[in-house]
Amino acid sequence: MAATRWHASPRPTAPTTADVDTGEIRVPLELFSVDRSQGDIELVLTRAEAEALSAKLCYHLNRTRPCGRAPRVSGRV
């Protein structure tokens, strides 16, 4: 049986939100198998996890200059 190639992409029309009480960050994603949408899901992170992910992404996307602060998310989940 061949492995299915899954990937996720941010949903551009759904904003990332944060719960100010718990520090939880929710990133809305759409799951794909190859190029067919399989549905929506939320990536749920703690504030520390979100900051670490942001730092790693910034490093890998922009190795030539220092990264600024992670963008602030607002709202309540």
Image: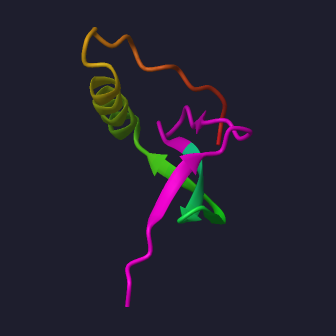
Q: Residue furthest bottom?
A: 1
| Figure check: 16 above or below 2 | above
Q: Is 19 on the left-hand or right-hand side of 44?
A: right
Left or right of residue 4, residue 67 in this image: left
User: Residue 42: image x %, image y %?
Assistant: 57, 53
| Magenta-colored segment: predominant secondary structure | loop
Q: Residue at x 55, y 48 (%)?
A: 9
Closest to the observer: 76 or 58? 58
Q: Position of residue 76 (x, y in %)?
A: 65, 36
Q: Nearer the viewer, residue 10 or 36?
A: 36
Coloration of the structure image: rainbow
Count of numbered tags: 0
- Corner quadrant of residue 35: bottom right
**Towards the viewer: 67 or 48:** 67
Depicted 64 relative to depicted 61: above or below: above
In the rendered image, the vertical position of residue 55 relative to residue 18, given as above or below = above
At 47% from the left and 65% from the top, the residue drawn is 6
Instruction: Give the percent coordinates (x, y) of residue 33.
Output: 54, 68
Q: Is residue 21 magenta?
A: yes
Q: Position of residue 10 (x, y in %)?
A: 58, 44
Quadrant of the snapshot with the C terminus: top right
Residue 61 picture quarter: top left
Range shown magenta: 1-26
Image point 50% across, 19% down: which residue? 71
Q: Is residue 2 above or below residue 7?
A: below
Q: Which quadrant of the figure contains the N terminus?
A: bottom left
Give the residue displayed 68% in from the left and 38% down from the top. Answer: 12
Residue at far right of view:
13
